Image (cartoon, helix red, strand yellow):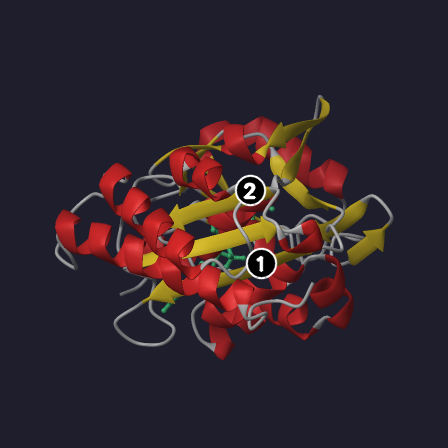
């Protein structure tokens, strides 16, 4: 299906892009990789009158690693993140999510920040951001501000970003040397959005779990952490498979997934429990991302 008509803008600087967004407000949409926006338009689920293509903006295509953590710029493609050894070391959970995102062709165009801004409930990156305590940096003509991942997702395809703002980078805190993380999911076919997925992290200095993050996607309009099961894991040994099974039971008892044409709520509950056990077992066996 053809896209509805729109006016195409291709600014050369961030200031020009922000001025265009300030001028056109919610009649404008940012175009990054186009892997979600263009299908949305073709299906007439959105009809922006102005597209502001940010692909020519300078200095937004870098992955920067420092002692304080990792910053991923707005124009870093999924494929670049997937191939980055620096990212694999400094933000292993982010790196682990990449192979699950669509297919290679989609990853070669789609951007990490576009995925976060689009906020599909079944997407990997918003859940990874929530698990890892990421910070979004949003720029507008008025200046820039930081938004914590926990405050970012507001609903179905809805975030705290204003129509006049560009997500210029996402920042992840420094990865603890004793932390492990992985992403596990169930999808009908590889490359499809997940029916249910889990971005999971534990920090286990000396083999005892000191903190845990269980961040589910595909279960609600935004990613969901299950605090009760996370707290239960604290103090347990890294190889305590009984505790992992009990954590899975707690997740299945607590989580309240939505139902749709793809899966019932009960089936998603079941999957969430199974994925909890699977993710934790991977981390225990160190088959997830190495510490
Ligand atoms: C067949 C198919 C399968 C897919 N499977 C998956 C999957 O399994 N998991 C997954 O996570 N994704 C999946 N995707 C989506 C893909 O990952 C997209 O690349 C991603 O969601 C959006 O990135 P983009 O750069 O293409 O954004 P675009 O499509 O250009 O933009 C998406 C939305 O985000 C906004 N936006 C983009 N960048 C910014 C920015 N810097 N600041 C503010 N707003 C911005 C746009 O205005 C638009 O509203 C799939 C896509 C397809 C077509």
Total marks placed? 2
Residue 150 percent across, percent down from the top left: 52, 31
Helix or strand or loop: what does disc 1 sit on? strand
Between circles 2 and 1, the one closer to the viewer is 2
User: In the image as oriented, which residue stretches furthest toward the top?
Assistant: 142
Task: Tell me whether circle 2 and circle 1 mark residues in contact (CB < 8 Å).
Answer: no
Position above or below: 199 against 133: below
Position above or below: 100 against 231: below
Q: Residues within 10 Å of mark 2 (few under 14, many from 20)?
A: few
Please state which of residues 103 and 129 is positioned toward the viewer in this rendering: 129
Helix or strand or loop: what does disc 2 sit on? loop
Residue 277 percent across, percent down from the top left: 38, 60
Residue, disc 1: 181
Residue 237 in the figure: left or right of residue 65: left
Q: Residue at x 50, y 78 (%)?
A: 104
**Residue 260 appears anywhere in the view:** no
Residue 242 in the figure: left or right of residue 203: left
Residue 248 in the figure: left or right of residue 95: left
Q: Residue at x 52, y 28 (%)?
A: 151
Q: Is mark 2 within 8 Å of ligand 1?
A: no
Q: Residue at x 74, y 52 (%)?
A: 60
Q: Residues within 10 Å of mark 1 (few under 14, many from 20)?
A: many
Q: Residue at x 47, y 36 (%)?
A: 231
Quadrant in the picture for the N terminus: bottom left
Q: Which mark is residue 235?
A: 2
Residue 225 percent across, percent down from the top left: 42, 39
Q: Quadrant of residue 46?
A: top left
Please state which of residues 79 and 131 is positioned toward the viewer in this rendering: 131
């Amino acid at each position: 299906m053809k896209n509805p008509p729109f006016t195409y803008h291709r600014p050369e600087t961030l200031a020009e892009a922000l001025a265009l967004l300030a001028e056109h407000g919610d009649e404008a949409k940012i175009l990054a990789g186009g892997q979600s926006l263009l299908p949305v338009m073709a299906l007439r689920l959105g009809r922006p009158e102005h597209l502001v293509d940010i692909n020519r903006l300078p200095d937004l295509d870098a992955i920067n690693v420092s002692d304080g953590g990792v910053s991923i710029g707005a124009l870093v493609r999924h494929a670049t993140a997937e191939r980055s050894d620096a990212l694999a070391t400094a933000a292993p959970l982010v790196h682990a999510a990449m192979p699950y995102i669509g297919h290679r062709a989609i990853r070669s165009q789609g951007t990490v920040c576009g995925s976060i801004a689009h906020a599909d409930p079944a997407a990997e990156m918003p859940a990874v951001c929530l698990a890892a305590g990421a910070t979004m940096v949003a720029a507008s003509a008025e200046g820039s501000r930081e938004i914590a991942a926990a405050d970012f997702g507001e609903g179905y395809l809805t975030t705290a970003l204003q129509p006049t703002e560009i997500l210029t980078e996402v920042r992840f805190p420094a990865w603890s040397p004793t932390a492990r993380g992985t992403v596990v999911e169930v999808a009908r076919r590889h490359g499809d959005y997940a029916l249910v997925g889990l971005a999971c992290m534990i920090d286990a200095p000396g083999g005892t779990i000191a903190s845990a993050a269980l961040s589910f996607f595909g279960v609600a309009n935004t990613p969901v952490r299950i605090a009760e099961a996370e707290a239960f894991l604290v103090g347990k040994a890294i190889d305590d498979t009984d505790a992992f099974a009990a954590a899975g039971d707690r997740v299945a008892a607590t989580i309240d997934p939505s139902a749709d044409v793809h899966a019932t709520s009960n089936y998603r509950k079941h999957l969430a429990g199974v994925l909890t056990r699977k993710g934790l077992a991977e981390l225990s066996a160190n088959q997830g991302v190495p510490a």
